[in-house]
Amino acid sequence: MSDELSATKPALLSDVAIPLQWLVLLVLSFALSALLGLTGLPAAILLGPMVAAILVETNGGRIRLPSFARVAAQSIVGCMLASSVSPEIAGAFLKDWPLLLSVVLLVVIASSSIGWVMGRSQIMPGTTAVWGLSPGAATASILMAGSYGADVRLVAFMQYLRVVMVVGAASVVARLWVNVTPASHAVVWFPPIDPVAFAETLMLAAAGGIAGYFLRFPATALLLPMAFGAALHGAGLMTIEAPHWLLAISYAFVGWMIGLTFSRDILLHALRALPQVLLAILALIAFCGGLSFILAKALGIDPLTAYLATSPGGLDSVAVIAATAKVDLSFVMAMQTVRFLIVLAAGPAISRFVARRLERSLGIGELK
């Protein structure tokens, strides 16, 4: 099979030296990230490198990332994710925790059920569908998915399509509801850095990376810095210092890591499944919209607050939209953060459960 793929692979870059292929990859990554950034898409600094890597790989590229680069990128992303937990969010959670947990669990159950339907219909492999539709934590879900039997390429395709659709829907609702246009924040690439906080962040990332490299436990390099960093940062004992230039490098490595594993066959499969994936994402958005309507009617919560709180994913983009509207920001961020953490904690167990159910229903041995 690999011989057939290599035979049909375009040879545009196959005779180009590896250093020049790296140059092509870097230039394409920068250009695509800049173009996507003009749209306001939060994931532009990851999507640009990922698309660039797909173009290089499917046109005869032979670039391969060293394992230490992958581990380092995951560790930095883990630290960045930990910074989303703050004392204010913890306080909002403690105030309304039964409500928050109930709504979050309903959203997770809905996304897993839609994933099961996609697996049962053989649109996508079961675990891939579950990870691809997980409502939030897009980058972390992609990094973890491959360690738990999912096809990380298709998970990335589904996750970032979900991000685009959820951000678009939330922006439209906010604008129609209260005429809110999400603010565009100028990116400060080289901000002043607290040397102590930056050193602590690098030490946390290094410890997680080293542990991940030697323990070989799935996604350790991501999960350890995120778990310890979130605990310390949430308790006010540590400040996560991750400047934008460092995040951009880490996201670029993650994007390349995903994109360089693509093939023409995977791209064709993703495009064939596009209508069904769009329908699944729309169903999830509609379900969350229904939950927000119930919250607003039954509990008297502001409708826009309820909608943004239940919006299925895109924590950073929802935060930007919520910050420009008259909503209960702490409630929105508490709901989004709790779901983000539950998705990461429960994702492996949910994917295994769905896979086992699909194995029984489809009568096959092992379903990835």
Image: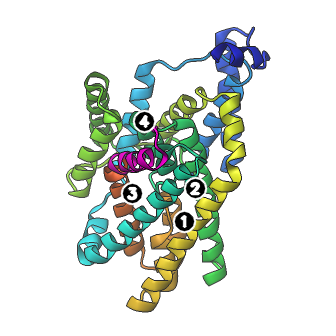
Q: Are marks 3 and 2 in contact (CB under 8 Å)?
A: no
Q: CA distance from mark 1 to mark 3?
A: 16 Å
Side (left or right) of 66 relative to 4: left
Q: Tell me where residue 202 sits by quadrant.
A: top left
Q: Which residue is mark 1?
A: 284
The mark closer to the camera, 4 or 1, is 4
Mark 1 and mark 2 lie on one chain; the one further toward the N terminus is: 2
Going 39% across and 57% down the picture, which residue do you hit? Answer: 340
Q: Are marks 4 and 1 in contact (CB under 8 Å)?
A: no
Q: Which residues are magenta?
A: 348-368
Mark 1, residues whose alpha carbon is within 10 Å: few (<14), some, or many (≥20)?
Answer: many
The mark closer to the camera, 4 or 3, is 4
Query: Which sits in the foreground, 224 or 320?
Result: 224
Quarter containing the N terminus: top right
Q: Position of residue 240 (x, y in %)?
A: 33, 47
The mark closer to the camera, 1 or 2, is 1
Kindly identify the amino acid type of the residue bearing the numbered disc 2: Val
- Tell me the element at label 1: helix
Mark sitting on residue 340: 3
Q: Which residue is mark 4?
A: 365
